[in-house]
Amino acid sequence: KVIGGHTDSPCLKIKPRSKKTNAGCIQLAVECYGGGLWHTWFDRDLGISGRVLLRSEDGTKIEQKLIKIDRAVLRIPTLAIHLETPKEREAFKVNKEDHLVPILSREVKKALGGTTEGEVSDGWAEHHEPILLQMVASELKVDVQKIVDFELNLFDVQCASLGGAFSEFLNSARLDNLASCYMAVQSLVDYTKEEKILETDEDISLVALFDHEEVGSSSATGAGSPIMGESVERISNAFNTHDSADITASSKARSFVLSVDQAHAVHPNYSSKHERNHQPKMNDGMVIKRNSNQRYATTAITAYVVREIAKRAGLPPVQEFVVRNDSACGSTIGPIISTATGIRAIDLGCAQMSMHSIRESMGSSDFSSGLKLFKAFFTHFREVDSSIED
């Protein structure tokens, strides 16, 4: 029993050579990751987070440290309306290379502050703004010279909030897909707290979270890697004295993946973008996603399993989503895992608006219904699946 999801979201990543100046401003060169609604990144207070590689004190090892500079150190200002042409005012068009360059500081501040002290020339550091390196070093409480490389992302520092007249909406960054990831992990924790559940459960219950879904999942840590298939094989072999391909194949045939990723809620201002009979709403429960062209992994059998589990758990009926015939359809890790392993899967998630915006919105009650459904999956799956004849 697997709940799978992806941890990544569209964002701006600092380039390997990020030093950039223009019009007296110190900027950082960034790269667009995934398919973001990039116009929403303008006029936001941006922080920096990611992974930093540090040389150890004796110089023999490289340590990895996570970092989060949770304050407004960067900003991408929009152009004042007075400087736009009438044609430019009609539609806000973004040149991702020229316009999505955040400002870090004024050059005069660098001169007054003497921030060039400690600059390093090693073929890497000199291509990054010393102010950036010093901020990273200060946050980690290390010398600048210890930094050998990093993978840094920009993020909106505004905290999540409840919205709506009755606090019925959750507004936050990266709901796609960290909301699903949280519900998956928490539901597994809640499930294991049930009395004697680990003694009586005949199945393995696990959560598998992958990277790089927003760019195709083709990486060592993506759903297209061997991780899922190898995990099932290793777990099967751990419970058997003999390494048997038949046992592994049987385990895969009995396995099931909930591929959980956020779904598109119908937008009241653009309701025509949804197929008339498939318009999921926020706070109306989880959404099963289907596509006959196999962009989603859902089948009649996997959909029945989830609907029956929801019924047995006393949850509202799940909603259904299908794209219009004249609309492109996104995809998820579900078809990728099924193709690579042969494991049955279904694609489902919570309905949300503003997907891939820097700030998204979902129904607050969908959080609790999602947790209950995921826990019910761990509890009732085997019983429901066994009722289906081959």
Image (cartoon, rainbow, N blue to C red):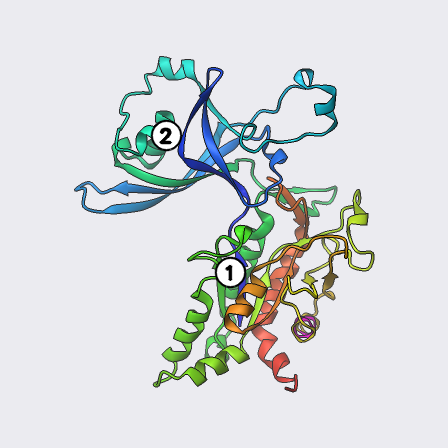
| Mark 1 in CB contact with mark 2 (< 8 angstroms) | no
Report helix, strand or loop for mark 1: helix
Q: Quadrant of residue 281?
A: bottom right
Which quarter of the rendered picture does the C terminus lie within? bottom right
**Residue 193 in sight:** no
Residue 113, percent from left and from top: 35, 16
- Residue 190, relative to residue 253: is it above or below? above
Q: Which residues are magenta?
A: 303-308
Q: Position of residue 329 (x, y in %)?
A: 68, 55
* Residue carrying label 2: 128
In this orientation, does residue 364 appear?
Answer: yes
Q: In the image, is residue 368 above or below residue 230?
A: above
In magenta segment, residue 307: yes
- Kind of residue sitting beneath label 1: Val
Exactly how many numbered labels are in the figure? 2
Query: Mark 2 Cα within 10 Å, few/some/many (few <14, many 20+)?
Result: many
What residue does disc 1 label?
A: 185
Residue appearing at x 16%, y 42% in the figure: 58
Q: Nearer the viewer, residue 73 or 99?
A: 99
Q: Label 1: how many residues lie within 10 Å, few (<14), some (14-19) or many (20+)?
A: many
> Which amino acid lies under the numbered mark 2 shown in the image of this protein?
His
Nearest the viewer among 165 and 389 is 389
- Any magenta on residue 354? no
The answer to whether 255 appears left or right of 347 in the picture is left
**In what element is the residue under mark 2?**
loop
